[in-house]
Amino acid sequence: MIGAGAVVSKDVAPYAIVGGVPAKLIRERFPREIGERMDRLSWWDWEHDRLRQALEDFRNLDAEDFLSRYGG
């Protein structure tokens, strides 16, 4: 995630939150294990129908519960 108004001049690590001028790491969005599980799940490659079926869970579950439910 990149904060509003941030100036990014380098690569941003997956699941990192950065902000400022120049952009600096604020914090990690998830622990590394959760990020690795998200990568394995690859929900962004799901078919639209599958995404629609999981929409409520995207909105209501935390990341770990979502991964547990969908096999990540």
Image (cartoon, rainbow, N blue to C red):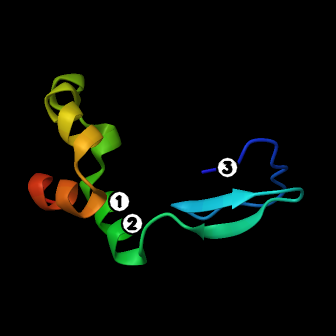
Q: Identify the element where label 1 is drawn.
A: helix
Q: Are marks 2 and 1 in contact (CB under 8 Å)?
A: yes
Amino acid residing under circle 1: Asp
Image quadrant in which you'd find residue 46 = top left
Q: Nearer the viewer, mark 3 or mark 2?
A: 3
Q: Identify the element where label 2 is drawn.
A: helix
Amino acid residing under circle 3: Ile
Question: x and y percent of residue 20 in the render?
Answer: 82, 57
User: Marks 3 and 2, how far apart in space?
Assistant: 17 Å
Q: Residues within 10 Å of mark 2 (few under 14, many from 20)?
A: some
Question: x and y percent of residue 40 in the render?
Answer: 28, 61
Amino acid residing under circle 2: Gly
- Say if 72 sits above or below 4 in the image: below
Is residue 45 rendered to the left or right of residue 13? Answer: left
Is residue 52 rendered to the left or right of residue 42? Answer: left
The residue that label 1 is drawn on is: 39
| Quadrant of the rendering where the C terminus is positioned | bottom left
Nearest to N terminus: mark 1 or mark 3: 3
Is residue 42 rendered to the left or right of residue 15? Answer: left
The residue that label 3 is drawn on is: 2
User: Marks 2 and 1, how far apart in space?
Assistant: 6 Å
Instruction: Work out whether residue 11 or residue 20 is closer to the camera in this orientation and state it.
Output: 20
Q: Which mark is residue 35?
A: 2
Is residue 66 rendered to the left or right of residue 3? Answer: left
Q: Residue shown at 69%/59% (left/top)?
A: 18
